Amino acid sequence: MRYINFEDAPAISPDDFFMGEALKEARYALEEDEIPIGAIVTYNGKIIGRGHNLTERLTDVSAHAEMQALTAAANSMGGKYLQGCTLYVTMEPCVMCAGASYWFQVSRIVFGAYDTKLGFGRLNQKITHPKTVITGGIRENECADLVKNFFKAKRNRL
Amino acid sequence: MRYINFEDAPAISPDDFFMGEALKEARYALEEDEIPIGAIVTYNGKIIGRGHNLTERLTDVSAHAEMQALTAAANSMGGKYLQGCTLYVTMEPCVMCAGASYWFQVSRIVFGAYDTKLGFGRLNQKITHPKTVITGGIRENECADLVKNFFKAKRNRL
């Protein structure tokens, strides 16, 4: 009988770990033939909301991963605001989702791949809550490759 | 027996008429002690989606009138996009809702009261869809007074 020796496990930062959870959500989207973007919300090191892109299944172009995760998190917090919470999302949020994070007063947004075309970072004014701190590029390549390969496969199928 | 003589009716522009329908929605919100903002979506002169602010009832700070009306309209259109549709809303949309209108590809946004603090118009870059045409200030005072009086009454109750 062998036991796992946790001392052998590679060190992984909390941001890398939680982005891994958002990546799991992105892969659920992929399984459903949705653009593979996933999100989770954490509070005090615990996951309190999960979501992935559901735009095709719900025929709702606003059903982004972040919207699902934010409303799920607010539900599980039993309150309106997500102060002290972090939103992890595999792709840089769009203007709608960044605007939603303003209303939820999310304390931190951590995203994986940059979206220079439609991400909120292209704006020259802050649209997130004044107190929201942003970190981009966590597990960037894994997050970006999921979406790139999805569209590559779509094009090859045509 | 008397008949209504329609020739006696005052002329009303389509924008004024449909803003009246958005105002009806705002009053439904007021009855539920929600911030009184209402929205409708029209297509070819017909109302295909309605909604009012439900942030308190749903404990969801993203449950804005526009989000309800846009998703309702997309449902009734049976498609993803709202090309050819007009969103009427009693208050200038926030960044989240304007961002949502981008994804829905709404052709026109008509709003009542200006929101210089949180409205999307404060941004110096266009965040709505390139093809979206904006009209503000329709029945502005009625729309603004509803919200002003709501907050005034709230303050007096404290």
Image (cartoon, coloured by chain):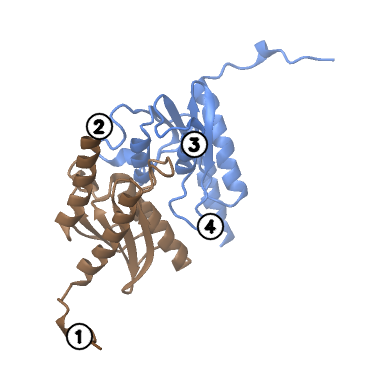
Chain colours: A brown, B blue
Residue that extends furthest to the bottom in the rendered view of this protein: A1
Quadrant for the N terminus of chain B, please: top right
Q: Quadrant of the C terminus of chain B?
A: bottom right
Measured in 3D between alpha carbons, the distance from the residue under mark 2 to the one under mark 1, in whole angstroms, is: 48 Å
Label 1 chain ID = A
Would residue B10 appear left or right of B88 to someone viewing this image? right
Q: Amino acid at mark 3?
A: Asn
Residue contact between numbered discs 2 and 1, judged by CB atoms under 8 Å: no
Mark 4 or 2: in front is 2
Numbered badge on residue A5: 1
The kind of residue on which mark 2 rests is Leu
Kindly indicate whether the residues beneath marks 4 and 2 are on one polypeptide chain.
no
Say whether mark 1 and mark 2 are on the same chain. Answer: yes
Determine contact: label 3, label 1, CB under 8 Å.
Answer: no
| CA distance for labels 4 and 3 | 38 Å
| Subunit that carries the residue with mark 4 | B
Describe residue B75's horizontal placement relative to residue B83 as left or right. right
- Residue A70 position, x and y percent, is 38, 58
Label 2, secondary structure: give it. loop
Q: Residues within 10 Å of mark 4 (few under 14, many from 20)?
A: few
Q: From where the camera sits, is residue A124 visible?
A: no
Query: Both on one chain, marks 3 and 2?
Result: no
Q: Give amino acid for label 4.
A: Arg
A145 sits to left or right of B32: left
Mark 2 lies on residue: A158
Front disc: 4 or 3: 3
The residue that mark 3 highlights is B75
Q: Residues within 10 Å of mark 1 (few under 14, many from 20)?
A: few
